[in-house]
Image (spheres, rainbow, N blue to C red):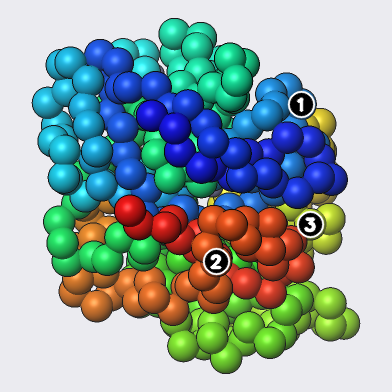
Amino acid sequence: MRVATPVFFEPGAPHQMVDLEVDEPGAGEVRVRMVASGICHSCLYAMDGDHAGIPRPIVLGDEGAGVVESVGPGVTSVRPGDAVVVSWAPGCADCATCRMGAPALCKRQPPLGRMADGRTRYHLDGTDVFHYGPATNAPLAVLVERAVVRIDDRMPLDLAALLGCAVTTGVGAVRNTARVRLGDGVAVVGCGGVGASALMAAAASGAYPVVAVDPVTEKFDALREIGATHCVDPREAGAADQIRDLSGGGVDYAFLTTSAAPAFGLATSVLGPRGTCVLIAGYPDGATVTFDPGWLLNGEQRIVGSKYGSSNPPVDVPALVDLYAAGRLPLERLVSGRWPISEVDAAYDALRGGHVTRGLLLMDQP
Ligand SMILES: [Zn+2]
Ligand SMILES: [Zn+2]
């Protein structure tokens, strides 16, 4: 089937809307008519050339939600018409990490831009067009069955798109990786879609204080509405002292969602004794950070990674829908902009400027 799809051809050039030939779903695959796609920072890295080996032309988008259009042979968990969240971490289902419920840590990833069989499912005039993971910016996406999680109708599909990456990552870092408890002091360094999700989860967990740290001060009112008890501009002199003072000598958890240069130093310097820096941020290839080992020893601090919120999407996504339906995760407040797919570059430019929490790309519905 031919579908008009935004395709990224080369850094510095805008997307082009082109009629792609989209394959039928093969064995164990589903084809999803996407309703909405979230605008994620990892796609910006791909666009700006910060990750090596991203093949082009490519369809971007790593979080989305839609409706199953058709299924290939052997698919059992969904049927045409089912509403689904699209995850970027289907895993292989078979390796040790997948079997322990950590598909984001799977070492048997398909080749970049392709499905596990080495082929792509998009073609343009006889040449292959690649997919950035699930390629949720496509109105019609072919995915392995494990990449979709069926949800019920308590959550609108535009908001459900955010469960594909940002919300699962931010909430999961708090709920699964850190296991924040009532009264823990929390700082969230970098309050885009992932950071704002972590703020919501920390507030819902009874953390106090919940300190939002972000240089875009216009977002502060919105961040307070979703659970921040205090907001700090990291560019201010004494920002770290301010955060330590707010939390009685340092926070129990600092969630680091940005690779911006001073952020790692700030997130680690505001930890109290036995505090933990939860590193969520994706860093460009080859990046390094430095810290004082004496600090780590003498305060028994920890630095831990959290990939995709240490989540197992078939378990976490339904739990997040429950929390949303119960009013504990006001996800509509994360959405700071909506764009039609024809304006995909405007959506990424807004994210690059740091002024959006989460942007959504909305597909034209047939
Ligand atoms: Zn993402
Ligand atoms: Zn695996």
Name the residue carrying label 2. Answer: 339
Instruction: Write the residue at 60% across / 77% down.
Output: 212
Q: Of 22 and 222, which appears nearest the observer?
A: 22
Asked if the residue at label 2 sits under 8 Å from ligand 1, the reply is no
- Which image quadrant for residue 237? bottom right
Give the image quarter of residue 242. bottom right
Q: CA distance from mark 2 to mark 1?
A: 28 Å
CA separation, marks 2 and 3? 26 Å
The answer to whether residue 68 is above or below residue 27 is below
- At x 33%, y 53%, the residue is 366
Helix, strand or loop status at disc 1: loop
Q: Disc 1 marks which amino acid?
A: Ala
The number of numbered discs placed on residues in the rendered structure image is 3
Visible residue check, residue 315: no
The crowding category of the residue bearing disc 2, from other C-alpha atoms within 10 Å (few below 14, some 14 to 19, many at least 20), is: some
In space, the residues marked 3 and 1 are separated at their CA atoms by 19 Å
Secondary structure of residue under mark 2? strand
Foreground pick, 220 / 350:
350
Residue that badge 1 annotates: 52
Q: Which of the numbered marks, if any, corresponds to residue 260? A: 3
Badge 3 marks a residue whose secondary structure is: loop
Q: Which mark is residue 174?
A: none
